[in-house]
Image (cartoon, grey):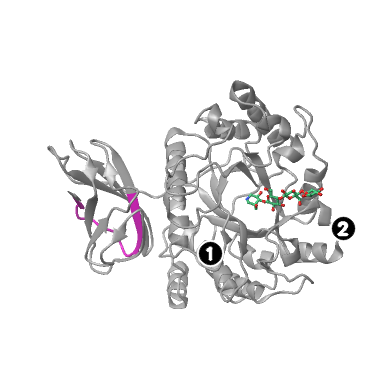
Amino acid sequence: MPIPRRGRGTLLMAAVTGAVVTATIAVTGTANAATTLGASAAQTGRYFGAAIAAGRLGDSTYTRILNTEFNSVTPENEMKWDATEPSQGRFTYTNGDRILNQGLSNGSKVRGHALLWHNQEPGWAQSMSGTALRNAAINHVTQVATHYRGKIYAWDVVNEAFADGSSGGRRDSNLQRTGNDWIEAAFRAARAADPAAKLCYNDYNTDGVNAKSTGVYNMVRDFKSRGVPIDCVGFQSHLGTGIPGDYQANLQRFAALGVDVQITELDVAQGGNQANIYATVTRACLAVSRCTGITVWGIRDSDSWRTGENPLLFDNSGNKKAAYTSVLNALNAGGTTNPTTPPVTTPPVTTPPVTTPPVTTPPPSGAGCTATVSLNTWTGGYVATVRVTAGATALNGWTVTVPLPSGDVVTGAWSSTNSATTGNVAFRNVDYNGQVAAGASTEFGFQANGAGPSATPVCQAG
Ligand code: G3I
C-alpha cells in the first residue's frame, strides 16, 4: 500500500532523529524534484529503464528520449537464445553488444534478458530433449554470461517457467522435461560465469498474490533455504485496465524472502486508468525498499509489442503522455531508499530479512493443526509469514487466529483471507491451500502497521 503523504513526513522525522533502525527504510524528501525518470528514480537509489531494440537506435527521436530519460536498458530481443546462438555453438553478439554499449556509454545499468526461455529458443534447440538439451542449455548460459561478465547489472536467468492458472506448478516445455532442477542448474551456471551480476527469475501474471506467483514464491524460498544462488525476482507487469489490489503486498512478500524485486516489463493498456495504474506501480516499488527499479517495455507507443494498445509513456511522436507525468510525480514524491548496490561486486551480497524467533503453538497430539509466525520487521510495520502444519490428519480447510496488539492494523494478506484488520484477526485458507496432507505445511502471510504479534496464534482445522 502506498505510504500516504502524512506517513512519509512522519518517517522522515524519524530518520532525522535517528529512530529508524534499518538503513533500508530511510525516506527521501521532495525538495529537489528531478525532471527525468532516471534522475528522479536515482534520488531513492533506484533505476528507471526501458526495453530497447537495436534496430531503432538510428531513430533520433527514440535515442534522444532514451538518453535523456532512462538510466537502465534491457534488450527487447537481442540477448535471447535465438539471437545469441542461432546455430549450436555459434554465438553472435553483434546486436546484444550494441544494446550493451548504448547503455554503458550513457551511464546506464544493463539488464540482461533472458538466458533461458522456452519461447524464442533457436530452432536447433527446439528439436532437442533430455541430456543433450540440458547440456546445450547450460553451455548457453555459461557462454553468454561469460561474454557479458562484469557488465550486466542483473540477468533474467530463467524467464516464464511457471504455468498460468491455478496449478502453481511449472510450465511444460522441453527444458522442464530435462528435470525439475533445470532452473537451479541455470542459476548455478550463471553465478559461476558472472559472479557480479544479480541473478533474477522473471515472469508475467505474477503481479498479485495468486497461485502462479505463489508457485514462484515457494521456489525462491526453497532456493534461498538450500543456497541456490538467486538475487532477484522480476515482475513483468504487462497490465490491462486494472491492477491487483495486493500488487505491493506481493512485492513485499518476495522481498521478505531476502531477494531484490524489480518491475521488469511494465506496460499498461491505454484507458481511463492508465496514468493511475502507472503511478500505483511506481508507488508500490518506492514503498518496498528492496524494489530496485522499474523498466517499461518500450519507449513510444509505436515501439510497443502491444500494437494498438498504446501502453507506454510516450506517444507515437515521442511526446510525453499523462502516464509519464504521473510516474514522474510519483517518483519525485519519494519513498523508501533502496540500498544501492555497486554494479560490480564479487560475490553479490544478499541481506537476509530481519527475523524474530517464531511464535509457536504446541504440536498437536492428533488431529488439528499448528501455526508458527515469523516476522520481518521495520520501524512501524512488518511482514508476517505464517506456517500452517497439519497434525496427524489431513486438513480440509484451516483458520489461523492471530492476536494483534492494540494499534496493529493489517494492510494486506496473501494466500489467505482475513476477517478483520485489528484485534484477533482470523486468516482463512484460500481455494488452493486449504488441503494440507497429514504432517505437511503450507504458508500464508500478511503485512501490517504496528509492532507485531507476541501472543500465540491459534490454528483450527476445518
Ligand atoms: O526481426 C524479425 C523481422 O526480420 C521479421 O520480418 C518479422 C516478421 O514477423 O519478425 C521480426 O522478429 C520479431 C521480433 O519480435 C522483433 O520485432 C518476431 O517475429 C517477434 O516474435 C518478436 O516478438 C518479441 C516477443 O517477445 C517474442 O516472444 C517482442 O518483440 C518482444 O517485445 C517480446 O518480449 C517478451 C519478453 O521477452 C518476455 N515477456 C513477454 C514479452 C512480450 O511478449
Quarter-wise, where is residue 173 in the image?
A: top right
- Identify the residue at horizontal 27%, vertical 69% (top origin): 407
Quarter-wise, where is residue 301 in the image?
A: bottom right
Query: Can residue 262 be spotted in the picture?
Result: yes
The answer to whether 423 appears left or right of 175 in the picture is left
Q: Position of residue 259 (x, y in %)?
A: 50, 47
Viewer-nearest residue: 217 or 428 = 428
The magenta segment is 444-459
Query: Residue farthest to the top?
Result: 131
- Identify the residue at horizontal 79%, vertical 72% (top origin): 317
| Label 1, label 2: how far apart the Cα atoms are | 33 Å
Q: Which mark is residue 256?
A: none
Residue on which disc 1 sits: 286
Front position among marks 1 and 2 = 2
* Dot 1 beta carbon under 8 Å from ligand 1: no
Q: Position of residue 127 (x, y in %)?
A: 67, 29
Residue density around tag 2, few if under 14, some if 14–19, many if 20 or more, within 10 Å: few
Residue on which disc 2 sits: 58
Quarter placement of the N terminus: bottom left
Viewer-nearest residue: 379 or 261 = 261
Kind of residue indicated by mark 2: Gly
Q: Is 388 included in the stretch rendered in magenta?
A: no
Kind of residue indicated by mark 1: Leu
Q: Secondary structure at mark 1?
A: helix
Viewer-nearest residue: 364 or 13 = 364
